[in-house]
Image (cartoon, grey):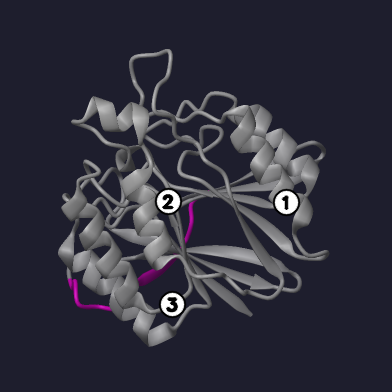
Amino acid sequence: MIRLFHVSDIHFGAEDVEALDWFKRVVRNEVPDAIIVTGDLTMRARHREFAAAAEWLESLDRPTTVEVGNHDLPYFNPWARFVTPYKRYRALESMIERPLEVSGVSIVPLKTTARFQWRLNWSKGHVSTSALQESLALVEAAPEGDRIFIACHHPLVEADTRMSSETRRGEAALDALARAGAEAVLTGHVHDPFDVEHQVAGRPMRLIGAGTLSERLRDHPPSFNEIRVRDSGFETLARVMDEAHPQAKGLVEPVAG
């Protein structure tokens, strides 16, 4: 069995120290095969926030892949946002990214952020043609027989959570990825866990969202997802921190779907 820990929205700058310590203990005790981080490592994309995120991720000492979230683009510096929006994120990525040599599973990134959008709320998702084509090429190049999971920050379609993603071109991207052979899309952004099945192109597609390890809670306490992959299929469990006993290992609950 392959065990993947899917975590999102850590938000250094508004992080929950107890939740981060809890997650680190679980990682050290259970040694997952890999860790997938689906964006919003920082709160305001400051240098010190990225430095703290990198130090914490390196301390986990597991193969790790990270995706960019809307909070990881410069917030207070318009020049940096438009000219070098991903510079600080890519510096972190190059520092902590390790190849995920997980036999039987391919994790394919999809960028859903944009430095600019023709709408007031730039925090929402957007899938560009180039980003989708890059992801489809990686899906096509995946080893034959691998389960293919897409990792991105914004849910491509809504999952009935309190917070929305409103991802432009998300439904078309979901359709294209399903037709190419992807089985699931792992996301964050909404700060609540979910696992729902969508019928896309005549086949089931799993939409899996992770909660948050930050202080910016919605309807659930701090949590992350554990994805268990077997030959017969895969399942998702929400690992929820016990609020009454923060030092506890955590509760295991099925993700609402």
SS at mark 2?
A: loop
What amino acid is labelled 1 in the image?
Val
Mark 1 closeness class: few <14, some 14–19, many ≥20 residues within 10 Å: many
Whether residue 254 is in magenta: the answer is: yes
Disc 2 to disc 1, C-alpha distance: 25 Å
Q: From the image, state whether disc 3 or disc 2 is nearer to you.
A: 3
SS assignment for the magenta stretch, majority: loop
Q: Position of residue 13 (x, y in %)?
A: 16, 50
Rendering quarter of residue 177: top right
Visible residue check, residue 167: yes
Q: Which residue is mark 2?
A: 193
Q: Position of residue 84 (x, y in %)?
A: 35, 36
The label on residue 139 is 1
Visible residue check, residue 242: no
What amino acid is labelled 3 in the image?
Arg
Compare residues 175 and 231 and report the one nearer the observer. 175
Q: Which residue is mark 3?
A: 62
108 sits to left or right of 79:
right
Whether residue 69 is in magenta: the answer is: no
The residue that appears at 43% across and 13% down in the rendered structure is 118
Tell me where the magenta segment starts and ends, as one range: 245-257
Mark 2 closeness class: few <14, some 14–19, many ≥20 residues within 10 Å: many
